[in-house]
Amino acid sequence: MIEPLSQVDSKVDILVKDGIVESIRPSINPKDEYRVVGLKDKIICSGFMDMHVHLREPGFEHKETIETGTLSAAFGGFTAVCCMPNTNPAIDDESIALFVQSQGKKANGGIVDVYPIGAVTKRREGKELAPIAELVQAGAVGLSDDGLPVADAEVMRRVFEYAGMFGVPVIQHCEETSLSKHGVMNEGLVSTSLGLPGIPSIAEEVMIARDMMLSEYTTGRYHVAHISTAGSVELVRTAKKRNNRVTCEVTPHHFTLDDEAVRSFNTNTKMNPPLRTHKDVEAIREGLRDGTIDVIATDHAPHSLDEKEVDFIQAPFGIIGLESAVGLALTELVHTGFLSLPQLIEKFSVNPRRIVGKEISIEEGAEANFTFIDPKAEWKVDVASFKSKSKNSPFDGRTLKGKPVGIMNHGQLLLY
Amino acid sequence: MKLSSRHLLGLYGMPAEDIELILETATSFKEILNRPIKKVPTLQGKTIVNLFFENSTRTRISFELAERRLSADVVNFSVAGSSVSKGETLKDTARNIEAMKIDMVVLRHSAAGTPNFLTQVVKSNVVNAGDGLHEHPTQALLDMYTLKEKFGRLENLRVCIVGDIAHSRVALSNIYGLITMGAAVSVCGPATLIPREIEKLGIKVFHRIDDVIPKVDALNVLRIQLERQAGGMFPTLREYHRFFGVTKDRLGRAEHPITIMHPGPINRDVELSADVADGPHSVILEQVLNGVAVRMAVLYLLAPM
């Protein structure tokens, strides 16, 4: 068991009764009525949370449903997800926030907790404030117009002020769209070589720079979604020295792949923000190592095969990520020495849960909310075996070292 | 002799031997085009479909003529009045046409990468006749053929591509092909029309046409599209002509004659003054004839036998 919060890293037996941790001891003698789960050489961690997923329900059930999305999360090693509000209708109203949570409780016996992110503006139009207080009261753990950045600086200022009253983070998809316009990939040598319109790194950076100033000027908490450039990492590093309300996340694809992958015109290398350069990947890994980047989140964005099986420009942005995230992080960050296992658990559990106010810990008397990982197992990504309804992953066929092997939450045990 | 690929998607990464083979083969076909009877039975019984999802007059006519001179059966498919306007996807359109036993597909499309996509969904050999802002390989091959015909070599030949480099598949294909063949390539245009990091392709970038002219053997002048002005890329066509236009005066300041190419259609007195377009060093009409010969060579070399 590794528990970064209490700095525990030891071999233990854990006795769970009715979903509650009854005791944690170096060794517990099993009684007849116990069910013994052998997890030799596996690591018990506090349950992982993916704070950035698109479950597509309501509105886009052909891509994913809360049932299939949470099953994908469960098999990816997550006991909780935060789902983004770009549904149809958007989660800009308490009834939709309640609906999403109710569907989450019904899905797969409720083994994965579903926490909605509410929209910051009505219909995600960036104009009028969404009913933020009602959304928070109805269970929204953060606010975002994800996919549609709040372009108007005045609106963003009011969002920070208003949301600041409730202590919920404002999560921004940072993109100055007047700079990114029709772009479909990172602007640079590869976009020039392929004749594809580019999304410059500055499109992300100018908005982060603006927002960090607005956050500092107000009392708002600011969480930068899916950071992708070296410049953004440096901006957040600077911001954190002045303002402790700033946090950020990165996706597994942004610490694994660079824009060279787009040369294949594979539409599963098209996402927003786009894959950047090798230099950006290096800066992101360094940002994870030095703590500038708090969270690994997938931006799980399912799209059907028909939607992705078109030319690159026409294809929608986004890839799925729930079932490859932990394997990629272990392979690309832990086995390469950028992160220790306790740091990895911070990025997947401690930090995202702290940011959205859903902290847990492994201790006697607490609810048993665990992710089990095997850090050494080698396996091959096979999208056909994924539980997600969609299969749009650029990692199909990739060999990884380390994977989740099960979860436990609300008294239910799932071992794959 | 065969090419190393059964498709022609672009000149990026194409080996020099392949380019040489196409240019050599084109020489024999050009000889045929100068005969009284300009037709050979080479592709008799083969069916080629010209899938044109973007307006094109000269490229389509050039391909069609090349196909007919090789005695292939030709099917023309263009967007207007097709099932595409009823919402059919490129994949379905191509597969449906292929189901009628097609041997080769010539594709023109407004989106970069569509020929690459097509090779994944159909079995036919695919020839790229221009995809978005990506590549236009047959245009670059005919440009190189024209240069080779004129100068006898491509190696160390100094070629500058002038104009809207950022929105030009012709520029990219020329850069890839010419660099492979050992030419010294540069581009010249307003900074707003030069894409990021293009110098990393191994070329020089200029923003003043007068700096370039004395240093080159040939200028490949691109068409300036009026909509780029509306898009805020440059202020006015007049200003463009005054600062980047290729004129007799400017060329006269060079010590040697400079060969002028243009992929057409020309905006006279915008990117190129009329007297230069029609002048003694212009090879623009040679390019048009060579286009048919080069396309015959490409189709002949790629046709499944």
Image (cartoon, coloured by chain):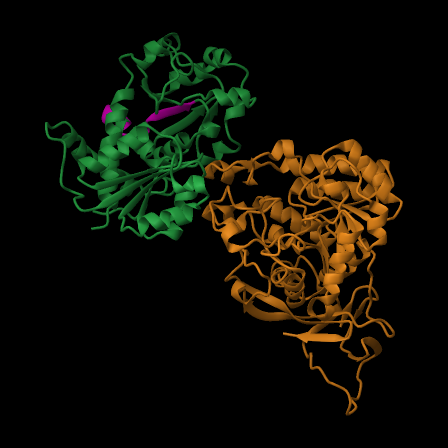
Q: In the image, is residue B37 above or below residue A256?
A: above
Q: Which chain is orange?
A: A
In the rendered view, does B265 fall on the left or right side of A356?
A: left
Asked if the magenta segment contains residue B167, the reply would be: no
Farthest residue toward the bottom? A32
Percent from the top left, x then y, of residue A144?
74, 46
Residue A370 in view? yes
Residue B152 visible in the current orientation = no
Colour chain B appears in: green
**Residue lying farthest right?**
A165
User: Taking B104 as reference, is B267 above or below it?
Assistant: above
**x then y, percent, for residue A352:** 76, 56
Q: Is residue A197 left or right of residue B71?
A: right
Whole-percent x, y for residue B297 in the image: 23, 38
Q: Residue at x 54, y 20 (%)?
A: B230
Tell me what residue is drawn at x 72 percent, y 50 percent.
A293
- Image quadrant in which you'd find residue B203: top left
In reply to whether residue B150 is colored magenta, the answer given is yes
**Which residues are the magenta region?**
B147-162
Please tell me which residue lies in front, B129 or A119.
Answer: A119
| Residue that lies at the very extreme toward the left in this rendered image | B36
